[in-house]
């Protein structure tokens, strides 16, 4: 399905019916990353799966920000005629967007799943690395970002087919979309002050071997979000829902049943 947000065409899929769940993918990925978990979760829930601007089948814009992505999500919910608040599930950059969505569109949020993400902003070294990545993508295309990311995304010993598939998806992403997202991540605010304001049921889930946002940063979020539940999934890396979709769907489904039914 398609909608337009501030002049940019956005693609989203809707599968299943029941309480609604909005899935927000990571960088430089697409809504396809949720497909194996959504295959299960859509038996019980209305799964709304957008591609963020600049990724998958959504149009790119030369600039982006967490605020723009968050407002795009609100536009998608509107286009989907989703009136009731939703469970928001975000992975990594999707989690950064989710914090902004919570700040700007609180009334849409019924519960949250923060997967393989972090609340803190980039430090100076991190921001400098982002500029290097933007320069590399400007020169060599999105494959530069894909090559830089691929070894950190999956746990050691992952099925090579999955690795190949995602290397290909990331390599063919829109360079404009990728560069805009990297700048948006560099500019994102510190979301740690938001953690104490989160007053909806929250599940924090992380792969045991996540090399980008390791379990320790999730423990900090868990301590700061009142009443949150935290789960470390054995054998998974940063791509938890792609690497262990059955485990992820069971965790998220169990959480939603407790949180919203
Ligand atoms: C992601 O997986 O979305 C990114 O690796 C997050 C980041 O680079 O900070």
Image (cartoon, grey):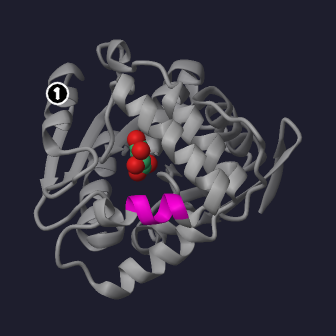
Q: What stretch of residues is rendered in magenta?
A: 144-149
Q: Who's the residue at 55% across and 41% down the image?
A: 182
- Vertically, is 132 above or below 208? above
Badge 1 density bin: few <14, some 14–19, many ≥20, Cα 10 Å: some
Quadrant assignment, res 193: top left
Say how many tags the image has.
Answer: 1
SS state under label 1: helix
Residue 90 seen in render: no
Residue at which label 1 appears: 220
Question: Mark 1 CB in 8 Å range of ligand 1?
Answer: no
Q: Quadrant of the N terminus?
A: bottom right
Camera-side residue of 74 and 219: 219
Main secondary structure along the magenta-highlighted residues? helix
| Image position, residue 250 (x, y; %) | 25, 64
Judged left or right of residue 234, residue 63 is right
Find out whether residue 104 is within the magenta segment. no
Quadrant assignment, res 172: bottom right
Q: Who's the residue at 77% across and 41% down the image?
A: 62
Residue 70 seen in render: yes
Quadrant assignment, res 210: bottom left
| Image position, residue 164 (x, y; %) | 42, 82
Q: Who's the residue at 17% across and 79% down the image?
A: 157
Q: Who's the residue at 16% across and 27% down the image?
A: 220
| Image position, residue 247 (x, y; %) | 23, 67
Camera-side residue of 16 and 173: 173
| Image position, residue 63 (x, y; %) | 72, 35
Judged left or right of residue 132, residue 247 is left
- Vertically, is 230 above or below 103? below
């Amino acid at each position: 399905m398609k909608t337009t947000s501030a002049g940019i065409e956005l693609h989203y899929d809707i599968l299943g019916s029941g309480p609604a769940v909005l899935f927000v993918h990571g960088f430089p990925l697409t809504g396809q990353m949720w497909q194996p978990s959504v295959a299960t979760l859509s038996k019980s829930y209305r799964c709304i799966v957008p591609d963020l601007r600049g990724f998958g089948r959504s149009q790119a814009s030369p600039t982006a920000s967490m605020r723009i992505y968050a407002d795009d999500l609100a536009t998608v919910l509107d286009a989907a005629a989703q009136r009731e608040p939703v469970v928001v599930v975000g992975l990594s950059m999707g989690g950064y967007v989710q914090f902004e969505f919570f700040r700007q569109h609180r009334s849409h949020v019924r519960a949250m799943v923060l997967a393989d993400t972090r609340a803190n902003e980039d430090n100076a070294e991190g921001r400098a690395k982002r500029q290097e990545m933007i320069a590399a993508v400007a020169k060599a295309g999105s494959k530069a970002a894909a090559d830089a990311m691929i070894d950190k995304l999956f746990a050691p010993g992952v099925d090579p087919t999955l690795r190949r598939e995602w290397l290909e998806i990331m390599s063919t992403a829109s360079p404009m979309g990728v560069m805009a997202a990297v700048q948006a991540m560099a500019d994102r605010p510190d979301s740690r002050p938001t953690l104490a304001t989160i007053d909806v049921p929250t599940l924090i889930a992380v792969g045991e071997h996540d090399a980008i946002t390791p379990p320790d940063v999730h423990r900090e979020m868990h301590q700061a979000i009142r009443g949150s539940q935290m789960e470390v999934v054995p054998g998974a890396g940063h791509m938890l829902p792609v690497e262990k979709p059955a485990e992820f769907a069971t965790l998220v489904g169990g959480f939603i049943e407790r949180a919203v039914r």
